[in-house]
Image (cartoon, helix red, strand yellow):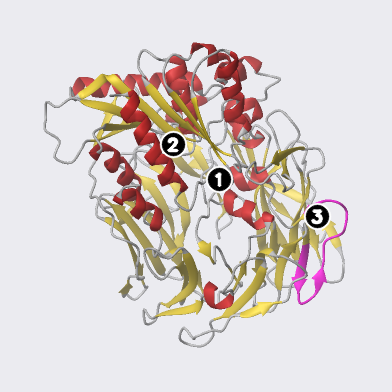
Amino acid sequence: MDDFLRLSASTGRFTYGAPRAFSFGDDGRLLWFLRSTGPTDAFDSLWVLDTASGAETLLADPRALSPEPGALPAAERRLRERIRLVAAGIGSYALSGDGRSAVFPLYGRLYRVSCEGDAAGKGRPEEVPAAGPALDPRLNTDGSRTAYVTGDALHTSPGGRISPDDGARWGLAEFAAAEELDRDRGHWWSPDGQTLLAARVDESALQRRHFADPAHPELPAEDFAYPEAGGPNAGVQLWVLGPDGARVRLDWDAAAYPYVSDAGWESETEILLTVQDRLQQTVLLLTADPATGRTRELSRTVHPHWVDPLPGTPARLPDGRMLTGADTPGGAARALALDGKLLTGEGLQVRRVAGVHQDRLLIEAGQRDPSEQQVLLLDPGTGELTPVADGPGVHGAQASAGTLLLTTADADGVRRTVRTADGREFAPADLSAPLPYRVAPVLERVTEHGLPTALVLPRGHVPGRRLPVLMDSYGGPGYQDVCAEPRRWQQRQWWADRGFAVVTVDNRGTPYVSPAFTHAMYRGFSEVTLDDQVAALHALALRHPDLDLGRVGVRGWSYGGYLSAMAVLRRPDVFHAAAAGAAPTDFRQYDTAYTERYLGLPRDHPDVYERDSLLPDAPNLARPLLLITGLADDNVHPSHTLRLCRALTDAGRPHQLLALPGVTHMTPNGTREKITALELEFFRRELA
C-alpha cells in the first residue's frame, strides 16, 4: 500500500482519536463520550466532560481493565455489525436514568462507573457480576441495577434471570429491527427502576444462514437466523417483566403490524411504542398500559409507497399534540405535521427532530443544496424558524437542559462545540489525524431530475488533459453520497491523484432531495439507478470535456457493488470495467424489511424481483469485472457474489473473484485499503 492507504488504515479512516457517541447526563451537567488516545489508537476509552468547567476526565480505559482481551462473543460481534461499529475497546455504553452512571460491555464482561458530585469525579470502574458472556447492558434510573443479555436470556444484576426459558431470544433486537429499522435494543427499564419492558423474539420459523471459514476447515460453521424476502419474519412480542415475577404482554395487532421500530417508558403507567405493517406503508404510535397490556392508537402515518423514516417522529409533545413526518403536496418536501396539519412547507427538507431546546423543536434540515444540512429551532405554535447553525457544511445537534452540542463538518474538517445555557463554549478535544486533503468537489445538479453530482479532479489538473473516469457511487436508498462531510472525499481525492476524474452521483431513490425523488425507486431498483447514473455521466461530460467517456470504470460496495456489476452487465457501451464489492445480486435472497419496503412481496411482484436480479444478465458480460466478497459477511451473504460467479462461469464469461476469509461487510482493520490497492491495479490495467 502507498502512504495514503497506510495512513487511512492505521487511523481507522481518520476516525481514531475523534470523540464520538456523545450522551448528556445529569440534566446537561455531564457530557459522556468515547475517544481513543490518538490518531492510530483503535481502542476507545470512556470520558466525561463537565459542562460547568469544561474539564475532561478519563473514566474507563479498556486496556487497564482487560490487558489481554479475548475474542468478542458472537452475539456482540453481530450486534457491532448491525450498528456499524468498528472501534475496539469500549464500543458502546448506556447511562442510568439520572445520567450519573454508565455501564458498558468489554469482551463479554460488564463494568459500571459513576460520576458523582458537583464536578466530574474520577470514577473507578467496577465489574458487574454476570451469569455468562454478556452484552447490551442497561442501567436503571439510579444506577443500582443492570439488565443485560447472556445466552439469549435477560438477566439483572443484582438479581438473576428474569426471562422465561421458552426457546425464544429475550432482550435483544432481531436482525430486521437492528439492520433496517434503527432499533438496536430490546429491553428498557421503567422510571422506578424496578420493572423491565423486554422484547421476546421467536426465530424458529426463519431459515438459518451458515458461515464456514475455508482458511480453518477444522472449525465448525457458524449460523444465524435470517429473514429472507418473502419468507417469515421473527415473531416479536413486548412483555412487561415485574420484580415479583409478574408478566404482562402488550397487546396490539402484531399480524397486521409485525415491525416494532421503537419502544420505551413515558411514565410508570404508560409505555409508547411505534409499530409498522410489513410493507411499511402504515406507521402507528401506540400508548400501552403496562398493568394490563392494552394499547390504543395515538397517531397514524400512511404513504402509498412507504413511510420514509423521520428520526424523532412519531412523537407526542408535552402539550399532548402528535408530531409526525409528512410530505408536502406533490412530494416536494419532507415536512413535519402537528395533529395531521403541516407545520413546515416547501423549501425545507426536514431530516431529524433532535429534541426540544428553549421550548422549541430542535431540528436538522436542508434549506439549500442537498449536500448541506442546517440546525434550526422550530416554534411548534407558529412554525417560525430560527437558525442555530447554518453556515456551509453539515451541522448536527444534541440538546439537554439548555446545553447544546453542535457538530460542524465542512471542507476544513469536523468540529464540535458545547454551548451552555449561560453562553459558555467548550470544544471536546479531538485527537484524530488531520485530513490529508482539503477537497472541494465540483457540485452540480444535472438532468431534468436535478441529480446531485460531484466531480473530483487531480490536484494540479491541467485543463485539456483527458482523464479516464471512475464512477464511485452508492446509489441505493437511505444513503446520501454527495455530502459536504469531508472524510468521505479523502479517498476519492486519492483516486483522482492517481489519474482519474472521479464522479459521484446521487440518483433518484437516494434521500434528502425530496420525497418524490426518494420514492422514484418504488417497485424497482435497477432501471432508475442505472438510467440516472448514465444520464448524469453524459451531462457532466458535456460540461467537462476532459472526461474521457471512452474509458469509464465503476466501483462500489454493497448497493454500490450491485450498481457496479449491473453497469458493465447492462451498459457495456458506457462502462468499460467494474469492481463490485459485496453486491446483493438477487434481492430474493436479501432481507425482508429492506427489500419489501421498496419492491413489495416476491409472490406479488415476481417480475420486479426478476428484473432487478443480476443473475439473468450473466451471459451478457463483455467487460472486465472484479467481484469482491467477504466470506464472513452476514449482511450481504457471500452467496450473492458466488451465485453470480457461478452464473458467469456457466455462461463461459471470464471474470475475476476476490473472496476474503474472515472479512465482514464493514471490512475493518485496513482490509478496505488493501482492497482499494488491488482495485487500482485492476482499473489501471483495464482502462489503460
Residue at image x 49%, y 51%? 668
Find the distance from the CA under tag 3 to the CA under tag 1. 43 Å
- Residue 617 makes an appearance in the image: no
175 relative position to 666: left or right: right
Residue type pointed to by label 3: Gly
Mark toward the viewer: 3 or 1: 1
Q: Report if residue 157 lies within the magenta region.
A: yes
**Mark 1 secondary-structure assignment:** loop
Q: Report if residue 237 lies within the magenta region.
A: no
Callout 2 touching callout 1 (CB < 8 Å) = no
Image spot of residue 72 (x, y percent): 63, 60
Image spot of residue 43 (x, y percent): 48, 66
Q: In which quarter of the image is residue 116?
A: bottom right
Q: Name the residue under label 3.
A: 293
**Mark 2 secondary-structure assignment:** loop
Residue type pointed to by label 1: Val
Find the distance from the CA under tag 2 to the CA under tag 1. 29 Å
- Residue 581 makes an appearance in the image: yes
Mark toward the viewer: 2 or 1: 1
Q: What stretch is highlighted in magenta?
A: 154-169
Q: Which of marks 2 and 3 is nearer the N terminus?
A: 3
Q: Which of 528 and 219 is in front in this view?
A: 219
Q: Earlier in the sequence, mark 2 or mark 1?
A: 2
Q: Quadrant of residue 263?
A: bottom right
192 relative position to 389: left or right: right
